[in-house]
Every structure is written in structure tokens, then in C-alpha cells.
Image: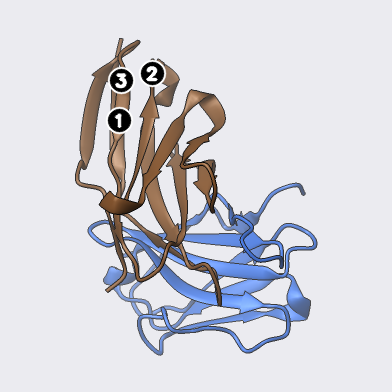
Chain colours: A blue, B brown
Amino acid sequence: GAGVSQSPSNKVTEKGKDVELRCDPISGHTALYWYRQSLGQGLEFLIYFQGNSAPDKSGLPSDRFSAERTGGSVSTLTIQRTQQEDSAVYLCASRPGLAGNIQYFGAGTRLSVL
Amino acid sequence: AQSVTQPDIHITVSEGASLELRCNYSYGATPYLFWYVQSPGQGLQLLLKYFSGDTLVQGIKGFEAEFKRSQSSFNLRKPSVHWSDAAEYFCAVGEPSGTYKYIFGTGTRLKVLA
């Protein structure tokens, strides 16, 4: 597709379950970001991938959160043992590898932890 | 600490009226500056960006923003608001190197009265 694609668009899960959120970046974009949008916290950076370099995980809130990017393209954000405070919209963005280019955002995955 | 402040959480204007959304940032150097708009259930759409050069930048949908270094501000303006402009607006600072990740303000929700 032409834009960043995220799936599922909505996810409802029970506290304690694991969830996986998927992001398909724009073809050819080497940089990929995950952000979390939650009430009271705004939009927070979670993790950044650039090509084959080690990811910048500095924004992950706890060790229950992890992400991988396979083949330099699709990325999966995994949240283990979900908690109610994990309820948020998770946004993915991609960027061409050139310095200064803008980030293009997907529509997000709305996660609700019951 | 690096931060972005959008002091107005909610703004209501009448259709046809002018609009100014405020954004102030705290950053060690001149960062990249962005305004994004988010409609309900949608991802973030870029309105405009500032990297360098002319401090008055034009964007899509009739929006413009002015970078004022002395005030660390990047306010968004539109001379005549349309009902379709009702949405949430985010100001963001982008790191000018490294990960180029964004730091977002908490957003301003715009309501337009007919």
C-alpha cells in the first residue's frame, strides 16, 4: 500500500494476556518508530529502528514491552502480561533514511486491556 | 529537559474566524519543528514543517506557522477556519540528528462552531 499500515485497528484483551501489534511501513523507508498515545501522557516515543542497526529502545516503559523488525520491513510490538495502564493507541511511523525527512504515521492500533 | 508545550488543551472558534494555536519548545539547539493534525480514528497528518531558512512556513489546508527563535515558539495560524478543521493538533520537535525521533506536545483540540 501507499501508506503505513497497522493491524489490528482495535484490540481488546484481558489483563495478563500477551498482545502483538503489527506495522507495515512504507516500502523503501529504512527508519521505523513506535509511539504510544494515552490519556494524560500524550504521545510518547517507544522504540526506533534504522536499517540493520541496533534499535533505540530508550522509550520502552518496562521489560514487558519488546519490538522486532524482520527483514528491515515489518515490525511487531509485543506487550507481555498486559496491564490496564497499557490501554492506549499505539502508532507506528516510518521515514526515508535521509536526514531530516518527515515521519509518516499509520492510523494506529487502539488497545483496550480489561 | 527537552519538552514541547501546547498551553491550550481546547480551543473553540466560529467558522470563518482566524485561528492561532500556540507551541513553545525547550531544546538545546534549533530542532526540526512540525505541526500534525489528527482527526478522530485517523493517524497523524503533517500540516507543515520547519527545518531552516524562512521562518514563516506555509503548509497544507491554508495553514502557516512562524518560527521565533527568541521566543522558542512555533505557532500555527489560519486566517479563516472551516468546519472541517475540527480535529486535534500536535506540535512536535524532531531531533536534528541521531534517531530524529519526535517529542510531542500534549495536543490542542479544536472545535469549530457553525
**Residue A11 x/y as whole percent:** 47, 60
Could you tell me which secondary element the residue under label 1 belongs to? strand
Query: Visible in this render: residue B53?
Result: yes
Chain ID, mark 3: B
**Pick the front one: A30 or A12:** A30
Q: Earlier in the sequence, mark 3 or mark 1?
A: 1
Query: Visible in this render: residue A111?
Result: no
- Badge nearest the viewer, 2 or 3: 2
Chain ID, mark 1: B
When asked about the image quadrant of residue A76, the answer is: bottom right
* Labels 1 and 2 within one chain: yes
Give the residue type at disc 1: Glu
Give the residue type at disc 3: Val
Work out which quarter of the rendered image holds the C terminus of chain A and state it. bottom left
Q: Which residue is tagged 2?
A: B79
Q: CA distance from mark 3 to mark 1?
A: 13 Å
Residue B7 circle label:
none
Q: CA distance from mark 1 to mark 2?
A: 9 Å
**Residue B25 x/y as whole percent:** 30, 57
Could you tell me which secondary element the residue under label 3 belongs to? strand
Q: Which residue is tagged 1?
A: B20
**Residue A29 x/y as whole percent:** 73, 63
Q: CA distance from mark 2 to mark 3?
A: 14 Å
Q: Residues within 10 Å of mark 1 (few under 14, many from 20)?
A: some
Residue B112 circle label:
3
A22 versus B61 height, above or below: below
When asked about the image quadrant of residue A100, the answer is: bottom right
Give the residue type at disc 2: Pro
Q: Is B86 left or right of B41, judged from the image as shown?
A: left
Q: Is A66 left or right of B19, judged from the image as shown?
A: right
Q: Is A23 left or right of A66, judged from the image as shown?
A: right
**Pick the front one: A38 or B80:** B80
